[in-house]
Image (tube, rainbow, N blue to C red):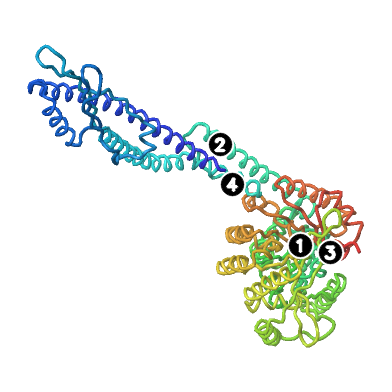
Amino acid sequence: MSLFKKLLLGVIFLLTLVFAISVLLTTLSARTYLEHHLSIKNADNAAALALSMSEKGADYVLMELALSAQFDTGHYELIELTDPTGQVSIRRVADELEAGAPRWFMDLFPLNVEPGVANIQTGWQQAGTLTLRSQSRFVYAELWRSTLALSGIFLLAGLITGTVGHRLLKRLLQPLDEVVDQAEAIGARRFVTKIPEPNTLEFKRVVRAMNELSNRVKSLLAQEANQLQRLQRESHVDDITGLYKRDTFLSALAAALQSNDESSTGTLCIIHITHLGLLNQSYGREPTDNLLRDIGESLNHITARQRGWTPARLNGSDFAVLAPREMDAQKLGLDIQAAMSAVVKDHSMEESVQLPGGTTVYTPRDSVADLLGRIDGVLLIDEREGAVTIAQASTGETPVRPLRAQVEFWHAILTQAIYSRTFSLTRFPVVDASNRLLHYEAPVRLAHQGETLNAGQFLPWIHRLQLSGELDKQVFALALEEIAHSGEPIAVNLSVEAISDHSFTKWAADSLMNRATAAKNLWVEIPESAVFRHLKNFKALASRIKASGGHVGIEHTGHQLAKLGALHDVGLDYLKVDASFVRDIPNNPGNQALLRTLCTVGHTIGVKVLAEGVNSAKEWENLLALGFDGATGPGISLPQ
């Protein structure tokens, strides 16, 4: 029972006790008062009647008539006349009448009234003794009426007091409710710090302590996130340009090619700065470094606006951009070249610098070596011919289809697929540290002309054609249906459109409400880049999913570690670390330090840390040693 209900029942009990005692004391006091006055009345009436009979000479007939007349008024229970020897001469006793009060009340408050006694004289001789007792039913009726009236007054006062007390208690206990909500939020890994301190001293101390606890956790997250960012920069970022180093970039490219989502298809672009050595000789090291630094800032600025894009400095003079979902390779190359050319012009080095480049579209069928080889080939041809252009390399299988033709081709396929609902979910296990199933990761697939297309083949076109919102709904509904059928936990990936569109959040909440049982086994993942671009909307969606009993996580984690502190009040269930940080982890001390710290931060706030793209048992063993709670990838399978 809640404290509020206990206090309210206590107030009601005290009011009832006070009411009962007050009614009892008042009724006893009124009974004593009425007994006293009734006794006086009996004595007075007896004396007056005896005097009247004495004046009439104590004639027996006259006395009998007078007593009968007096008794017939109905005000007496007993009138009795005894002679000097004690024998009853005349006796009148009233029949038992309706008392005007309940029997239990009369038994509870019996009347002890002295009868009136007077002597009748005939001259100097006593003619008899008169005993008179008035009707008590009038007293009981009056006593009952006064008790009822008093009870009504106390009941009304009790209702008024109870209403006022109820509101006062709610007001006094409101800070406690907020503290309870805050404690429950902390239990759900949401560290809320916005509770105002109340005036009540005890509550004020508790609220202050809870706020300080949440603030400490928030500060700890911020500090650890900055530490993670520092480790990441030391291991993965070029000191001069602020771009990713070659090894980190190639790991990201390899992870994208092996992924089951939209990242597995896109464009790779490499721009070469010619004569970089001569720049150092002609302009000096510091101006050249400033040029490289500004180029890095420009590329970071371009890629930051696109979800999942990765810029890098491959070596001294080669800069690369990995652009998942981007299918217009020529346009991307020209945009990157134009941005770098603007920086060169700002440094007044356009006479000494040329920026040839090569681009190619990549698919899951490619390898890192194939992609780099294709671009090196077109760059070599341009270098021989002295051209400073953006050369697009063929995929090696078929000639590059014009972009407009590709758009028309995929528009026909995807609109028909959405209309006919031919999408499906496949399953890959995600296991915990004991190799037990946590959930199934369920990327979307598309059946087309007898072939099953993976997500990387069509998701970039889904986004380009602005069909992501409808696909998210179908994936969400498919997952709930499969959970309802199999009872197994399933995780689905949602796009940035799912959290940027308020209507999707409402639709998802209604869907979860209609399938309340299945909702408890639903795991929803949002890409890290999308989360921090739409943090407020992400929190709203996460709140709806968590309220239904579902689970919320962030996938492809690791690229924006400095922002982890902003998630202190979300109540996340897990983080899935991007496969680029997991690849070849046994031989990468920098990533080991980074991921060990990330696991510590996650466990501090009660969040599971999972790994994506685990390729081998050796990688999984190393990840377990670093503190990971689970993993998925080609090297992960459920025990038979």
Q: CA distance from mark 4 to mark 1?
A: 38 Å
- Residue 422 at x, y = what percent? 72, 82
Q: Nearer the viewer, residue 494 or 82?
A: 82
Q: Which numbered disc, 2 or 3, marks the residue closer to the eye?
A: 2
Tell me which corner region of the image, top left, top right, bottom left or bottom right, holds residue 514.
bottom right
Q: Residue at x 75, y 86 (%)?
A: 401
Image quarter in which the N terminus is found: top right
Going from N to C along the chain, the mark reached first, 4 or 3, is 4
Going from N to C along the chain, the mark reached first, 4 or 1, is 4
Q: Left of 506 or right of it: where is 31?
A: left
Q: Which numbered disc, 1 or 3, marks the residue closer to the eye?
A: 3
Amino acid found under the numbered disc labelled 1: Ala
Q: Which numbered disc, 4 or 1, marks the residue closer to the eye?
A: 4
Going from N to C along the chain, the mark reached first, 1 or 3, is 1
Question: Total marks drawn?
Answer: 4
The answer to whether residue 288 is seen in the rendering is: no
**Tag shown at residue 208:** 2
Number of residues whose C-alpha sits closer than 10 Å to that of mark 3, classed few (under 14), some (14–19) or many (20 or more): many
Location of mark 4 (residue): 192
Q: Secondary structure at mark 2?
A: helix
Q: Secondary structure at mark 4?
A: loop
Q: Is residue 152 above or below residue 391?
A: above
- Residue 42 at x, y = what percent? 21, 25
Location of mark 3 (residue): 633
Q: CA distance from mark 4 to mark 3?
A: 35 Å
Q: CA distance from mark 2 to mark 3?
A: 45 Å
